[in-house]
């Protein structure tokens, strides 16, 4: 299941719902992404984050996330998957993303979670604008994110 929302989420509640959906799971892996408190300007200056604003393209975003889940299901037998991605203005340490994967075996759940996050970071149509006291700029893709995505092509 996929949700794109402004509201925060309850990790414990999401875990319980995924556990019910997964039935006889041997493993559930949970990942929660948070707004970082450090703002990098041209990799030279470090400035505390004031806010992070996230936009998306309704309909397209959900379709993209569903396609990513579909790719994961093609590689691993998953009993349940849950993605929540927040949009709007967020502050440092706010939750941005929840990902839960469940499978009969722990390695499948771990690998699928990593795969989904790597694809989400590089393929999902979200746009992020970080603001500090000094500056405000749109966040560009990082080389480390595209490298992580590339690493799945050979697996």
Image (tube, helix red, strand yellow):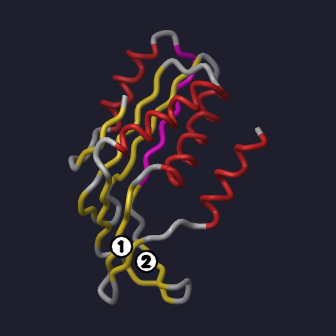
Q: Quadrant of the N terminus?
A: top left
- Is 31 magenta? The answer is yes
In the image, 154 versus 83, the foreground residue is 154
Mark 2 and mark 1 in contact? Answer it, CB < 8 Å.
yes
Q: CA distance from mark 2 to mark 1?
A: 7 Å
- Residue 120 picture location, percent across and down: 50, 47
- Residue 134 picture location, percent across and down: 33, 89
| Residue pictured at 32% horizontal, 67% vertical | 52
Secondary element under disc 1, as helix, strand or loop, is strand
| Residue pictured at 57% horizontal, 25% vertical | 73
Q: Which residue is mark 1?
A: 130
| Extreme residue toward the top, this view | 24
| Residue pictured at 64% horizontal, 20% vertical | 105
Q: Are there few (<14), some (14-19), or many (20+) residues within 10 Å of tag 1? A: many
Q: Quadrant of the C terminus?
A: top right
- Magenta extent: 25-33
- Is residue 127 placed above or below 6 in the rendered structure? below
| Residue pictured at 33% horizontal, 66% vertical | 92
| Extreme residue toward the front, this view | 60
Q: Which numbered circle lies on residue 39?
A: 2
């Amino acid at each position: 299941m996929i949700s794109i929302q402004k509201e925060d989420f309850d990790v414990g509640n999401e875990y319980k719902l995924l556990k019910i959906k997964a039935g006889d799971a041997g493993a559930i892996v949970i990942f929660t992404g948070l707004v970082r408190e450090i703002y990098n300007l041209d990799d030279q200056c470090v400035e505390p984050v004031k806010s992070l604003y996230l936009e998306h393209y309704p309909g397209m975003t959900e379709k993209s996330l569903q396609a990513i889940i579909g790719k994961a299901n093609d590689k691993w037998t998953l009993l349940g998957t849950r993605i929540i991605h927040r949009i709007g203005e967020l502050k440092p340490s706010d939750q941005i993303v929840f990902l839960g994967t469940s499978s009969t075996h722990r390695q499948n759940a771990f690998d699928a979670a990593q795969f989904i996050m790597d694809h989400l970071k590089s393929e999902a149509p979200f746009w992020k604008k970080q603001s500090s006291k000094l500056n405000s700029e749109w966040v560009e893709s990082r080389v480390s994110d595209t490298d992580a995505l590339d690493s799945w092509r050979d697996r």
